[in-house]
Amino acid sequence: MTKKYVMLADTTRCINCKACVVACRAEWETPMGHTRDWVKEVEWVQNDQPKVMLFPGRCQHCDDAPCIEACPSGAAYKREEDGIVLLDNGICSGCELCIPACPYEARWLNPETNTISKCTFCQPRIDEGLAPACVQTCVGRALVFGDKNDPNSEVSRLLEEKTWVKLTTDEVNVGPNHYYYTAGEALPDEVMPKQYDRHLSGKVMEIVNPVGAIGLGAMLLTFLGAGVIKLVGRRNEVCASENKEEK
Amino acid sequence: MSTHDHFDPSRRAFLGATAGGTALTIAGLPSQALARINAPHESEKLKETTEVFGFCDMCYWRCGLKIRSRDGRAVKIDGNSEHPNNWGVVCAKGNSGLMVAYAPNRLKYPMKRVGERGAGQWERITWDEALDTVAQELKKVKEKHGPQALSMIGHGTWEKPYHRLAHAFGTPNTTSPVFGLCCGPRGLSNMIIIGRNLTGNETIDLENCKYFLMMGRNITESLHNGETLGWVNGVANGAKVVYFDPRYTITASKADEYYAIRPLTDHAFLLAMIHVVINEELYDKKFVTEYVDGLDELKQRVQKYTPEWAEPITEVPAKDIRRLAREMAAKAPSVFVYAPRRMTRTSNDFGMGMSITILNTLFGVWGHKGGVFTPQKYSVPEIDLPEFKHAHLARRAEDGGDFDYSDMMDLPPEYDSNHIADKHGTIYRADGAGVPTRWPVANAKYGLTNEMWRAIAEQKPYPIRALITAGGNGFLNSTNYDIIRKALETVDFYVAADVSPNEMNMYADILLPEASYLERYDDLQVGGAREAYVAVRMPAMKPLHDTRDAWTICKQLADRMDLGAYFPHDSIKELLEDRMKKAGSSLAEIEKVGILKIPADPAKNFPLEHGGKLQIKTPSGSTKAELIPGMLKMMGYDKALDYVEQVRPNEDEFHMTFGRIGFHTHARTQDNIWTADFMRENVLWIHPEPAAKRGIKEGDLVKVSDRNDRSGEIKAKVTARIRKDSIFMVHGFGHWDKRMTTAYGMGVADSDLASYAVDPHIGTMSMGLSLVKVEKV
Amino acid sequence: MSDTSQMIPVREKKSIYMHWFNAGIRLLLLLTGFGIISGELVRVVPAFWPEFMQGLFGGNDNLILTHSVLAMIWIGVFVLFILFNFTNIVLPFLKNVLVLTPSAAIKDMKSMTLNLLQLFGIMKNVPIPPQGRYNGAQRLLGTMIIFCSIILAFTGLYLFFGPQVLNFSENPLYGAIFRWSLVAHISCVFLVVTGVIAHVYFALVEEPECMDAMKSGHANVEFIKHHNALWYDELKQEGKV
C-alpha cells in the first residue's frame, strides 16, 4: 500500500510565533529574504469586533500540481511512493516558470543555487523517520504530519475526529494535501489559492508532440519502404539480366 | 549508371509499408509517456550531525535543547522532548539562537575604551591585560570606598558567577531586573499571601484547567514554550478563556470572551470580582475553612468595591463581572486567574497582584487538579565555599534560581540612619530593597534594579564607584535614560561582560567578550515542575572567537583579587563534576541524556486530590494563607490592598502601552538577523477613529511624545485591535548603538516613552502610567 | 560540345567541410538534445534515452552545457563562414535555394510531389519540369532548414542564457518567451529531422552521385544534364562544360 503524506494545521492552536519558519530556515539553510513556510495573520472587523485568524502555510503537495505541468525541465515531480511534490536540483534550470503556476505561491528561486526551492515536507528527514522540522518545533502543536493511508496514524485519527478544510475554490482546486481546522470559521480570501497560469504553450505542445512523433515515424517508415521497394526492384532487374545472359 | 529507369515499383509493398509504419508509430505513442522522466531523480539525503544537550539562553524560561553540529559547527537547535519546560518544542527565538553565535558583530575579543566613555571607540587588548586592569581597578575602589562601592547588574543565565564574584568581593549590591522591572509584584503577592512564588516557571496545571481569567497575560505572544503549549492544550481540552487587555492580541483571538478593559484598571475589576465571590459565598468553603485566614476582614474591606462601582472605572459591565464570578465558581477549583508576566504597570501593581492571589485562593486552586500544583525539587547541593561577608540576602540569589522570593523576610530588625550598615556592621543594599524605611518588602536577593541605577547616578545613600554588568541592557529595559546615562558616566570604572554589543556596554571601560551559550558549559539548571529535574548545558562547538565563558572569567578575576577560594575549580567542567557528585550522579551520566528527573508524583503535586494536606508557610510564619497579610498590616503596607485611582489621558492623549511579540525577547533579539527578519521595526498601533481625527493613515510616519518631552517617530498601524484611548508598540526597538548593524535606527524605543514612576509600596516600576500625544509628521 | 561524361568541379572544399561539420554537429545536438529532460512539455523520445545520456554526462546540467556549447560552436563557425564567404558562396547558394514567393513554392511543391511519387512508381510517365542547380524538393527543404536553424539558434540562446541573465520573477514576459521558445525549438527540430530523413535517403539510396559530389566536389556532367537541366544550360553558357 502506498503512502499518502498530508499536513494538518489546526489554526486554533497556531499562535503565529514563527517557530516553524525559523526551524525550516535553520534546517535547510534558506537564504534571507525567502522562506519555505510562513504564517499568515489575517485580521478584520466583524460586527464591530476585531477578528484574527492564523494560517501556517507551505507547499500543499497537490495531487494535480500545476507546477509539475509548468516545469519545462522535468525537475518538478511527484514522488510516487508517498505523493510529495519534490524538485530535482540537478535538473532545475531556474527558469522560474513554476513560480506563477503555483496557486499558493510556495515556490521561489534560491539565488545561491539558482534553482527553485520550496517545502519538501522535509523529505530527507521523513525518509529517516523524523518529523518535519516545522512540526517538531511547533509551539502550539498546531502542525501534525503523517500518512493518511495509515488508519492508525495521528493524522487519520484527527481527520476523522474533526472537520478539516482545504484551501480550494470553485475555480482553483488542484487537490492540495494540506488540511486546515478552523473550528467552523469561514476561510478568509487572503489565504485562498490564486488563479494560476495555465500556459497555452502547454496545450500547443500537446499537439506538437504527437504530430511530430507521428511525422518522424511516418517519414522514417516511408523511406524505409521506398528503400525496400528499390531493393526488390534491383533484385528483379539482376535476375532478369541473369536470365537473359543464360538464354 | 542511372537505375531508376528500370525501377519496377510494387504498389502493394509501398502502401503496406506506409500503413504498417504509421500503425507502429501510433502503437508506440503510449511509450512516449515514458519520457516523463521519473527514474533519474535522486532523493536528497539528510546530512549527518552530532548532538549535545543544552538549555536555552534566548529568554528566561530556559527550555531543554538538543543541539546538532556538523563539521565542528552548531547547525540546528532542537528541543529536548524530555524537558518539562518545553517537551521538545522550540520557539522562533530558540531556533534563532544560532544567529547569536554566528552574528558577525559579536564581541570577539577583549577591548579597552580609547575614546570618551560611550563614544564607542575601542582597542583590542589581550585577556591578561583586560583581567589585570579589571582586578586592579576594582581593588582600587575597594581600598578607597569599601567593597560596597561595587555594584553588579546581571541579566542572563550566565550571570551567576558574577554575583558570586561580587559577593566574595564583599558587596551586597548585586541585582537582576527580574524583581524591579518585571515579575516582582506578581511573585511577591503570591509569596506574602500563601508563601509560594508562582512565577518563574509557573506551576499551573494548565492542561486540566477549565477556566482561565487572563488579566493581560498575553500568553501566545509573551510566550514560554511549555507554558504556552500547556495553555493551548488546556484550551483544546475545553477550558473557557476570558481575556482582558486594551489590545486585541492573538491571545484575545483565542478567547471565548474578550474585554477591552480600560488600561491600568484591572485592580478595580478584580476587587469587584472578590466582592461578588465573597458576598455571594461563591468561594471554596472547605478550602477557605481549612487553609485561609482573614476572610471576614477582607469582606469588610471590599464592600465598597461593588461591580457597579467598577463598571465606570473599568468599562466592564457590572452584570458581566457577576456572571464571570459565578461561572468561575462553578468550575472551581479547576480555574485560574492569570497575572500578566511583567507586572510593573500601574501605581499599585502590588495591590493588583494580591487581588489575583486572593481570588485564586478563594477558588481553592492550590494543590488541586486544574489549579496550581506543588512542584518537586531535585537536590543538587552547591559546592562548598567560604563565608560571604555583607552579601547576606543577595548572596542567596544564586542558589534559588530565578524568581525565588522565599527568603524575603530575613529583614534586619532596625534601620540605622547612616543608611549604610546596621548596628552589626552588615551593609545595607544601596537600592534599599529589604531595607527598613526604604523598600522593606522589596526582594533583597534580586534587588530593585531601577533603584540601583538611581543610587549609582545620585551616589546615594553611599558612593558606588565601580560597576560590573553581565548581560542586559540598562537603557532599553529601564525607562529613564537620563539616570542610566548618568550612572554609567559617574562611576570610576565600568566593566561589561557580554556576547553582543548594545547601548549599555558601549559605555564600558573594559569589554569582556563572553562565549555564547552554544560554545560553553554552564552551571546546572535545577528546576521543579510536576517532576523534579536537573539539566546540563554542553558546548555544541568550540568558541568561534577569542572569548571565554563567565566561570573562567570570574575565576581568573578572583585569582587576581585574592578571592580564589570562592572559585576553587579550575574550570566550569570541574565544578559541574563536583556538583553532580554531590547530587549522587556524575557529569558523564547527565551528559548522556541532558536531563535527570524525579518522575511526577500526583500525591505530591496535587495533595488535595489524594487526601493529603497543603503545606503553607507564609513569610510571617502562618501555616494558613493570609488574605490580609499580617506582616504588611504591621508595616502599614496593607493599604496596597485598596484601589488607587489611576491616571487618565486628556482628550488629546493616549495611554502608552507596549508589549511582546512571539519572536522577540525583550530588547535582545532585534539585532538577531533571523528574528529581525519578521519585524525590522516596530509600528504604532492606533484605532481608526483617533487616527482619522489626526489624518493618520496606515504606514504614515507619526510623532509620539509624552508629557516629559520625550518623543520618537514611528510608522502607524491603523487597526481596530486597540482601544481608542490607547496606543501600542512592540517592545525592544529603537536601538542607537551603531554596532547593532541590523537593529540600529529601526523603530522607536518604548522604554524611552514609558513611565519611570515607581510603585509606592514596593519600589517596582510603574511603566504604564505614561500618557502620550500622537501627531502626523 | 564538350564531353558529357567528364567530371567538373561544382563545389569549393570549404563548402564541403562546412556541410560535414554541419551534419556532424547537428547529429550531436540531436543526441544530446533528446537527452535533456524537459518535463511534461516535451515528450519526444522514450525514457531510456535521457536516462542513458544523463548517466553518461553525469546529470542534466552537464548535458545542457554540452548541448549549448556544441550549439554555440555551430553558431560561431557558421557566422564566421558567412562573414568571410558571403558574396562568393553564401549569396549564390541562397539565390539558388531560397523559395520566397508563393508561385515558386507551388512550382517546387509540384516537382517535389512528382519526385516523391515516382519513387513508388506513381505518375511515372509525367515528365518532371527541368530543374536548376537544386531541384524543387531540395529548395523547399533548404529553405525550411535555413529558417528553422535561425529559429533554433535564437531560441536556443534564450533558453540557455535567459534564466541566467534575466530575473524571471520580475516580468512574466520572460517566462512566456522561454516557454514559447521551447515550443518553437522543439517544433523546428521535428521539421528539420523530418526533412533530413528524406535528404539522407536520397543521398544514400537514390542518388549516390550526389554523395560523391559532396565528398570530392566534382560532379558528372551527364548527371547534371539529366537531373538539373537548367543548371546545365547555365554552366554551358558560362562555358564551364
Image (spheres, coloured by chain):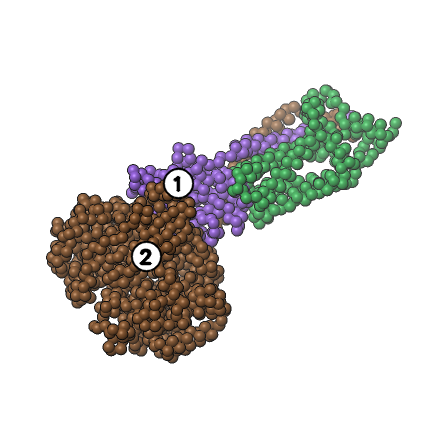
Chain colours: A purple, B brown, C green
Q: Chain of mark 2?
A: B
Q: Secondary structure at mark 1?
A: helix
Give the residue displayed 53% in from the left and 40% down from the top: C171
Q: Which residue is mark 2?
A: B755
Q: CA distance from mark 2 to mark 1?
A: 40 Å
Give the residue displayed 37% in from the left and 72% down from the top: B465
**Quadrant containing the N terminus of chain B in the rendered view:** top right
**What amino acid type is highlighted by mark number 1?**
Val
Q: Quick one: label 2, few (<14), some, or many (20+) residues within 10 Å? A: many
| Residue B171 at least partly seen | yes
Q: Chain of mark 1?
A: A
Q: Position of residue A172 (x, y in %)?
A: 42, 35
Give the residue displayed 42% in from the left and 65% down from the top: B505
| Residue A23 at least partly seen | no
Q: In this rendering, would B227 be left or right of B298?
A: right
- The residue nearer to you, when weighing B773 against B759, is B773
Whether residue B773 is situated above or below residue B388 in the rendered picture: above
Judged from this view, the residue extending furthest toward the right is C1
